[in-house]
Amino acid sequence: MSEHVIEVNNLSRHFGKKQALSDVSLSVPEGCVFGLVGENGAGKTTLLKHVLGFLKPQQGSVRVFGLDPVADPPGVLGRIGHLSENRDLPAWMTVRELIEFTRAFYPKWDPVYAEELRMMFELSLNQKVPTLSRGQLARAGLLVALAHRPPLLVLDEPSSGLDPVVRKDILDAIIRTVVDEGRTVLFSSHLLDEVQRVSDRIAILDQGKLLLTSPLDEVLVSHYQLTIRFLEPQPFFPQLTGALMWSGSGREWKIVCNGQKQELETELEQLEAEILDQTAPTLEEIFVARMKSAQRASAQE
Ligand SMILES: Nc1ncnc2c1ncn2[C@@H]1O[C@H](COP(=O)(O)OP(=O)(O)OP(=O)(O)O)[C@@H](O)[C@H]1O
């Protein structure tokens, strides 16, 4: 098997006139937590469905464990723990039946771990699936995704419906345990602080296009935030190399930038502007800056 658990090459997908994915290429190395981020409708679920083999690529290819997930569903799905966006669990079952039913599909099901997770998630065996709250549904979905100790976990918005305490304590613990055991996690999330906390690598999707895919620490060190003061008030923010997003008015502005600082510093000198402060932006600030910059670029096309 290649060292990449998932390889996506030039994947494109449209639904009617809607281009949901456009020439997306990325790879997920073994043993990594890969966070997939993007606004609503960016194409995250569509990408995950291709990884699971639920959608066939219209263009490009997807390989999971070196296999085509559409051609070999047992070879791929049997090794994946999956939490879907809609948590679509069988509505007629109790939690006990859900556990027994799912167990039948997985020879490597670990009943002791399943029980540990059930206790941790405070799920009662006799509760019926339709009566579970959103948070309980997510926890039940996570339980059945995890209890066969799959080498790959694919989680679509795992935090959605979980309260902050559960989210932080349980999700982080699960994700770290999975990776400490050498397994791999691919998850999508809107919660950028969470993605920053747990991910080794990230990808940002914007309207079906891949804006960036990189190790998280590289993303963080290649962006910086400056507070600058001009000699004279500026009616508009001037063009500056690497500036992705700016806010402010008059003489003082805050900017989020990407890339080498040297060129920007020279430009600031020429504009008689001084740097008052430099900080490291959070992933959320970088994400917003990248989206704004992409929107400006597409408005100019
Ligand atoms: N089966 C489908 N039929 C028609 N359009 C679809 C279908 N599935 C997805 N789309 C469209 O493709 C685009 C990408 O959808 P997708 O669900 O992948 O986005 P997402 O990033 O997961 O969004 P969210 O964060 O809201 O879950 C959206 O415009 C969506 O409406």
Image (cartoon, grey):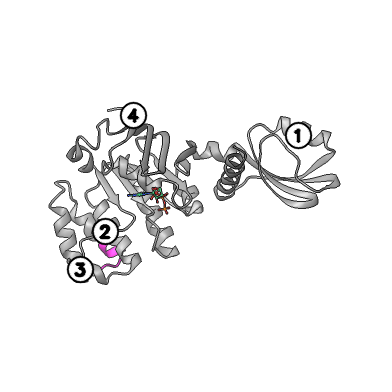
Q: CA distance from mark 3 to mark 1?
A: 62 Å
Question: What residue did someone put label 2 on?
Answer: 88
Judge whether residue 168 is colored magenta. Answer: no
Identify which amino acid the numbered label 2 is placed on.
Asp
How many numbered circles are shown? Answer: 4
Label 1 element class: helix
State which tag comes first along the sequence, 2 or 3. 2
Identify which amino acid the numbered label 1 is placed on.
Glu
Label 3 element class: loop
Q: Residue at x 40, y 58 (%)?
A: 159
Can you tell which mark lies on residue 265?
1
Can you tell which mark lies on residue 125?
3
Label 2 element class: loop
Residue 261 appears anywhere in the view: yes
CB atoms of marks 4 and 3 within 8 Å: no
Neighbours of disc 4 within 10 Å: few (<14), some (14-19), many (20+)? few
Instruction: Judge from the rendering whether residue 32 lies leftward or rightward of residue 80; answer left or right.
Output: right
Question: What residue did someone put label 4 on?
Answer: 3
